Amino acid sequence: MDAEYPPEPWDLHGHGCVSLWKAQRDMLPPLPPGVRPVIAFGHAVVATAFVDYLPGGLLPYRELLAAVVVRDGFRIGLSITHIWVDSPASMAGGRELWGIPKELAELTVIPAPAFAATATGIAEARHSSYGRGVPAPIAGSVFQTLRGALARTPVRMSGRVRVAKVGWKFAPDGPLSWLEGLTPVLGLSVVSFRMRFGPR
């Protein structure tokens, strides 16, 4: 029996670390039909993130994701190509509500004194951030394939963003090994964020 999950929207809060990478277009995983990667200075832009969604939000769980910055016409957003969570409810809801290809994994996130996160057999990250950060309200879109069609889900988030130095290691034979050898162009720490995912 599939896990039960709450209806959209999902109101979540927590903290995490994000890195942006430059990648050759031919390195990218398949994207939903109808969207194209955003190309900046000859490269596509990939985001990776570890996130710790805390109790007090709709669902507490941990997450690792990789996403490609894409466009649908003039609309810019993300398409999540790889994602792991440690909550069956999150996995089921992500797949059924939004077409997000969530898989289960063993994840550990230690937020302090220095952020450290691991997805067993997939990746690990360590980061240190600088300064108090700045408030950063963000509104965007996530584009996925849902029941054979392109689906856009709005996402709204607020929190404090700090520049961070993030070090990543990817399992050599793991699903994110295509990122090994690339250098992040920007690292960010996102602190005490609140996010609303959906409704479509």
Image (cartoon, rainbow, N blue to C red):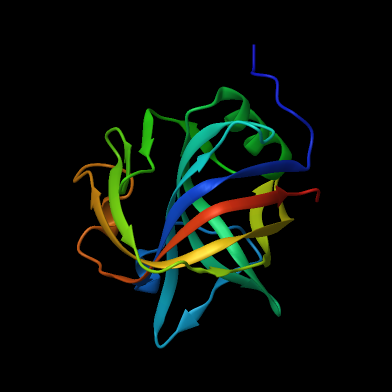
Note whether 73 is above or below 61 in the view shown: below
Q: Looking at the image, which residue is at 50% across and 58% down?
A: 190
Give percent across and percent down for residue 182: 25, 67
Q: Nearer the viewer, residue 50 or 199?
A: 50
Q: Quadrant of residue 181?
A: bottom left
Q: Is residue 147 something one can see in this rendering? A: no
Q: Looking at the image, which residue is at 66% across and 42% down?
A: 12
Most extreme residue toward the top, as rendered? 1
Note whether 186 is above or below 157 in the view shown: below
Q: Identify the image quadrant of the N terminus.
A: top right
Q: Is residue 156 something one can see in this rendering? A: yes
Most extreme residue toward the front, as rendered? 132
Horizontal arrangement in the rendering, residue 37 relative to residue 115 (left or right): right
Give percent across and percent down for residue 67: 49, 58
Q: Looking at the image, which residue is at 38% across and 37% down?
A: 109
Give percent across and percent down for residue 150: 71, 56
Q: Quadrant of residue 79?
A: bottom right
